[in-house]
Image (spheres, grey):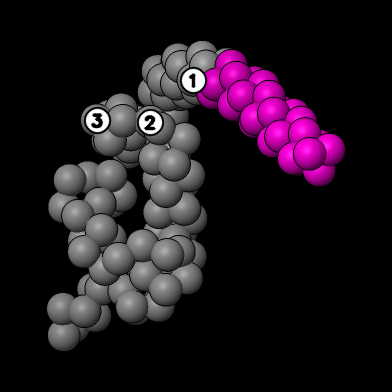
């Protein structure tokens, strides 16, 4: 797959794909003899993983460390698992905070809807 196809498929800019490769977030992508990047299905899955983890708020530095460990092979399984467990715990804390914020927003919206309904009712009575 060409970079333009991967970009369109995953909704990431070509610059972002190049950046991910340059910083080691994804392994170097094979190239055609002309130098054009040639993405494999495995490359696309790796990018999807990185995109998913970034959307969940994982820092790039953590993901780069994870990829480095992955590239070292099975002897790093425990360390990779530890990274994912830690990031999962961080995500759960953020979700808890977001749910608290959502509850507050719901409460405020409900109050304003009640106030607006009472104002409408009062205006109709006049």
Secondary structure beneath label 3 = helix
Dot in front, 1 or 3: 1
Q: Is residue 50 above or below residue 82?
A: below
Secondary structure beneath label 2 = loop
- Residue 43 placement, left or right of 120: left
* Residue holding disc 2: 58
Query: Disc 2 to disc 1, how far (Cα)?
Result: 11 Å
Query: Disc 1 to disc 3, how far (Cα)?
Result: 19 Å
- Magenta part mainly helix, strand or loop? helix
* Residue holding disc 1: 94
Residue shown at 39%/40% (left/top)?
54
Q: Which residues are magenta?
A: 98-126
Q: Residue 122 in magenta?
A: yes
Residue 32's mark?
none
First in residue order: circle 2 vs circle 1 = 2
Q: Is residue 32 above or below residue 82?
A: below
Q: Does the CB distance between marks 3 and 2 fall below 8 Å?
A: no
Q: Residues within 10 Å of mark 3 (few under 14, many from 20)?
A: few
- Residue 81 placement, left or right of 2: right
Q: Quadrant of residue 73?
A: top left
Q: Position of residue 74 (x, y in %)?
A: 44, 29
Judging depth in this view, the residue of 106 and 88 nearest the camera is 106
Q: Position of residue 67 (x, y in %)?
A: 33, 37
- Residue 48 placement, left or right of 109: left
């Amino acid at each position: 797959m060409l970079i333009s196809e991967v970009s369109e498929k995953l909704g990431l800019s070509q610059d972002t794909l190049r950046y991910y490769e340059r910083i080691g977030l994804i392994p170097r992508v094979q190239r055609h003899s002309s130098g054009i990047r040639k993405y494999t299905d495995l490359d696309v899955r790796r990018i999807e993983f990185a995109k998913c983890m970034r959307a969940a708020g994982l820092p790039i530095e953590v993901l780069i460390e994870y990829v480095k460990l992955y590239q070292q092979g099975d002897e790093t399984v425990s360390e990779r698992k530890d990274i994912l467990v830690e990031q999962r715990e961080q995500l759960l804390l953020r979700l808890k905070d977001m749910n608290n914020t959502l509850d507050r927003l719901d409460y405020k919206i409900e109050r304003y809807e009640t106030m607006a309904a009472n104002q409408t009712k009062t205006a109709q009575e006049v």
